[in-house]
Image (cartoon, coloured by chain):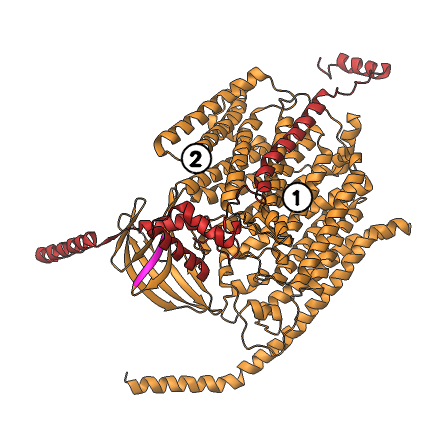
Chain colours: A orange, B red
């Protein structure tokens, strides 16, 4: 084809495009824009209505009590359903605005772009401050809906009080959303295109990290609402602890998944070769996780042994308070870290005020009413499973307090015009010994029986785990010569794993004595399936151990190199030999990229790290990772000068164990939750049990 | 494919391989390693919570240059860190020192373990000492009912 023909063809296409443009495009877009203009206002209206209905939901039990119209209490159930529906409409109109590129909405214009892939247009809903808060309240209303639905059958008489607590939380967050940081704010004149979604957030890990985290944070609001309602109405905690156990476990699971996704995102997207930096925002999610972990353990004690009632309520309130604190820290802009994008003192003051009121009320109610929830049973011996759980709670509470100290201390000092930095070296120094205590406890506690341990028997159970632990520590010290933390860490891992085997083996052996004809594998399976609640927990412990292996491996045995190379150069890192082949540049829909190519000389893989420039002109690095179970090779392309390129190269041993262990934890949680729920009104059965116990 | 061609290809592949082996192997500048080792414990003063070693900010780059220059002059790690703390204060250290402001950070964690641990121990001790509630004596009615049940073989002894 001649050059002429090409140009004329191009001209023709241009002409057609020009002809089509005025005919179809603007009118079509105009109509669509009009529709979405109306929809976003509908969403805004719904959000306002939801705010008001939530206040009614919060007032309903008070009105029922003081106006002496018990039927009014039922209003809160309908109100909860209505709030959830209205909020959902609001959320859908926002998502619609993103999908239809409705840049007349300020939030859409600031966080989306016509070039953005559809998937990220939807997830951009929580890509910024306003939308994340909306997601928070959306999740909260949906959880409230589930409570309302579930409670109508199981605890109808207490339901209004529980829903009232949730209603006030919803109203509090809606106050912030509607009056200080509205995602529905309009923008005129309408820009032709939006600013892009922060490129760092254009990643599947980041797309799911915030919703998971919020499902966790907000999930703890349900036990919180139960606790407050129970304290105020003097509802015996053995009657409701069974309901919040599942909620606490589910919330814990979401929080765990959220934290792991955050670490995953940090590792693959931020390009610094690590996954956890003890950044205040990470700590904000880690504190509720620590106290939540204490909670899910001690709820079990309460259910089994009717003790620690008051303490559990304290933990419930603390966990949710830390969730609120996390939201405050991240969303108020009080931390100026890479995550905290919001800088607006009005919002900060509102969140701080709201949080202070919730905390003051909750702990005030607890102090006044807590004694009515006191435990009844005694502890038979300091050598019992019960006391092990107390130590678990001690360790997790101290761990959370230390993270809180390290996170808040610089902020508090700054208020007095003094400045101090608390970074990873501090947290590692303080937290690693605590984690070791926790690991040791995790190894021994499942071997200690309830009520009172026979010390001679306990010794015979512990002896093998101790031998395995010491042996693995010695082998580690002899073979790899790591720092003392590595030796102790591996030793404890060995101890816990052997403890898990002993715990399971003991039960299997007994079973085989009774059923000698059963196949060993079948016996193991039946044992595990027969007590899913316990062994689900043990699977979670196993997952934590796998994570610990990953932490030791990647934390202590990491090698990294910064090298400047010309094409053809070879570099050796760890056991890997890599040759730099050269770079190429290319364009994508929403960014331009420079891609380097490193080829392995002793393995069949290549690494292609990229530097990307997005619409916002913010350059990002895209790490390239080659993973096997035992090690990751991680490459980032940094500077370039006169045809030579600087690479950051890392070999991270055992890092895949983090994700593997995390998945194991989630699987174990699902397993523990899968045991069959006993049907029928729980409160009736529990009150029967309480009566029998009297 | 003729054998000669095959031989040529094999030779060519070997030549490539030889070339790759002969290519320059790049080693990390040991100075760079020392620089990064110091930089990872210093805070990039303009960015938040990022060590100098990880930051892309201009100031961090300048600080890395400064560290490298001082290392070239033969200064020790302690001297270089002192150079920065003299200029920026202890704020620049990611690991807070044990001093007027930092002391609390180092005293409180062990203190917390002791306090909360003592609290936990007290709870266990108090609970363990408390005698279980007295079991109320069976009423004659109940006793008769149990004896009847035992007689009927419904309850095992």
Residue at 48%, 25% in the rendered image = A465
Among all residues in the image, which is located at the extreme left?
B4
Q: List the residue tagged with mark 2.
A: A486
Can you give x and y, in whole percent of width and height, for residue B118 in the image?
Answer: 65, 29
Disc 2/disc 1 C-alpha distance (Å): 31 Å
Kindly state the secondary structure of the residue where label 2 is placed: helix
Task: Name the front one of labels 2 and 1.
Answer: 2
Residue at 36%, 61% in the rendered image = A639
Label 1 lies in what chain?
A
Q: Which mark is residue A580?
A: none
Q: Is residue B91 covered in magenta?
A: no
Q: Which stretch did the figure color magenta?
A: A644-648
Q: Are marks 2 and 1 on the same chain?
A: yes
Is residue A160 among what the camera can see?
A: yes
Can you give x and y, in whole percent of width and height, for residue A18 in the image?
Answer: 47, 86
Q: Are marks 2 and 1 in contact (CB under 8 Å)?
A: no
Q: Quadrant of residue A378?
A: top right
Q: Is residue A53 left or right of residue A521?
A: right
Looking at the image, is A420 positioned above or below residue A15?
A: above
Mark 2 or mark 1: whose residue is earlier in sequence: 1
The number of numbered discs placed on residues in the rendered structure image is: 2
Q: Main secondary structure of the magenta part?
A: strand
């Amino acid at each position: 084809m001649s050059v002429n023909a090409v140009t004329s063809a191009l001209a023709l296409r241009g002409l057609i495009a020009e002809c089509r443009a005025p005919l179809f495009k603007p009118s079509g877009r105009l109509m669509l824009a009009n529709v979405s203009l109306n929809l976003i206002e509908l969403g805004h209206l719904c959000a306002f209505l939801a705010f008001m209905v939530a206040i009614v939901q919060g007032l309903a039990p008070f009105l029922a009590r003081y106006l002496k119209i018990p039927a009014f209490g039922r209003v809160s159930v309908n109100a909860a359903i209505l709030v959830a529906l209205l909020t959902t409409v609001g959320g859908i109109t926002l998502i619609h605005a993103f999908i239809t590129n409705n840049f007349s909405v300020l939030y859409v214009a600031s966080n989306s772009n016509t070039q953005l892939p559809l998937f990220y247009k939807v997830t951009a809903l929580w890509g910024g401050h306003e939308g994340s808060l909306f997601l928070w309240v959306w999740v909260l209303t949906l959880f409230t809906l589930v409570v309302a639905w579930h409670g109508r059958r199981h605890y109808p008489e207490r339901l209004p009080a529980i829903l009232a607590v949730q209603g006030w939380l919803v109203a509090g967050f809606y106050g912030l959303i509607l009056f200080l940081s509205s995602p529905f704010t309009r923008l005129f004149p309408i820009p032709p295109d939006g600013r892009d979604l922060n490129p760092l957030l254009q990643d599947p890990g980041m797309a799911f990290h915030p919703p998971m985290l919020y499902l966790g944070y907000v999930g703890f609001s349900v036990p919180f609402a139960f606790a407050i309602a129970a304290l105020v109405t003097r509802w015996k905690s053995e009657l409701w602890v069974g309901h919040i156990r599942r909620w606490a476990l589910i919330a814990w699971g979401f929080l765990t998944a959220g934290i792991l996704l955050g670490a995953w995102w940090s590792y693959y997207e931020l390009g610094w070769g690590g996954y956890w930096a003890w950044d205040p925002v990470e700590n904000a999610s880690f504190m509720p996780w620590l106290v939540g972990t204490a909670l899910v353990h001690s709820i079990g004690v309460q259910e089994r042994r009717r003790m620690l009632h008051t303490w559990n309520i304290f933990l419930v309130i603390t966990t949710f308070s830390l969730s609120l604190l996390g939201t405050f820290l991240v969303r108020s802009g009080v931390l100026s870290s890479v995550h905290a994008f919001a800088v607006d003192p009005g919002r900060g003051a509102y969140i701080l005020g709201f949080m202070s009121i919730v905390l003051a009320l909750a702990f005030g109610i607890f102090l006044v009413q807590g004694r009515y929830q006191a435990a009844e049973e005694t502890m038979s011996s300091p050598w019992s499973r019960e006391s092990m759980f107390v130590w678990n709670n001690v360790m997790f509470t101290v761990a959370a307090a230390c993270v809180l100290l390290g996170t808040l201390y610089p902020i508090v000092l700054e208020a007095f015009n003094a400045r101090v930095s608390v970074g990873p070296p501090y947290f590692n120094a303080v937290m690693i010994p605590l984690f070791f205590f926790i690991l040791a406890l995790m190894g021994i506690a499942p071997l200690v029986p309830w009520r009172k341990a026979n010390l001679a028997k306990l010794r015979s159970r512990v002896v093998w785990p101790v031998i395995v632990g010491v042996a693995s520590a010695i082998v580690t010290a002899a073979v790899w010569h790591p720092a003392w933390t590595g030796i102790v860490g591996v030793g404890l891992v060995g101890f816990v794993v052997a403890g898990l085997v002993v715990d399971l083996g003991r039960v299997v052996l007994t079973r085989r004595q009774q059923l000698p004809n059963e196949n060993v594998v079948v016996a193991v399976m039946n044992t595990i399936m027969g007590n899913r609640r316990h062994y689900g927990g043990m699977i979670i412990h196993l997952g934590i151990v796998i994570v610990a292996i990953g932490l030791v491996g990647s934390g202590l045995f990491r090698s990294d190199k910064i090298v400047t190379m010309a094409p053809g150069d070879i570099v050796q890192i760890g056991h890997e030999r890599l040759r730099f082949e050269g770079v190429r540049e290319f364009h994508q829909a929403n960014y331009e990229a420079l891609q380097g190519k490193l080829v392995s000389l002793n393995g069949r893989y290549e690494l292609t790290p990229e530097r990307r420039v997005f619409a916002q002109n913010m350059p990002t690095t895209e790490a390239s990772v080659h993973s096997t179970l035992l090690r990751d090779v991680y490459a980032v392309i940094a500077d370039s000068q006169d045809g030579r390129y600087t690479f950051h190269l890392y070999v991270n041993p055992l890092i895949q164990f983090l994700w593997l262990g995390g998945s194991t934890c989630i699987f174990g949680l699902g397993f523990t939750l899968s045991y069959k729920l006993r049907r029928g009104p729980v409160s009736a059965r529990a009150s029967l049990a309480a009566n029998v116990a009297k | 494919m003729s054998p000669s061609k095959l031989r040529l290809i094999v030779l060519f592949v070997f030549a490539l391989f030889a070339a790759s082996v002969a290519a320059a192997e790049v080693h990390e500048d040991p100075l760079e390693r020392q620089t990064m080792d110091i930089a990872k414990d210093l805070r990039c003063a303009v960015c938040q919570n990022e060590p100098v070693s990880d930051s892309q900010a201009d100031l961090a780059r300048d600080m890395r240059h400064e560290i490298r220059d001082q290392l070239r002059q033969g200064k020790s790690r302690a001297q270089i860190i002192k150079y920065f703390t003299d200029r920026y204060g202890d704020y620049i250290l990611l690991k807070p020192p044990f001093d007027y402001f930092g002391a609390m950070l180092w005293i409180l964690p062990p203190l917390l373990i002791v306090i909360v641990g003592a609290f936990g121990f007290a709870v266990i001790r108090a609970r363990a000492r408390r005698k279980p509630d007295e079991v109320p004596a069976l009423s004659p009615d109940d006793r008769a009912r149990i004896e009847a049940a035992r007689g009927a073989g419904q309850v095992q002894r």
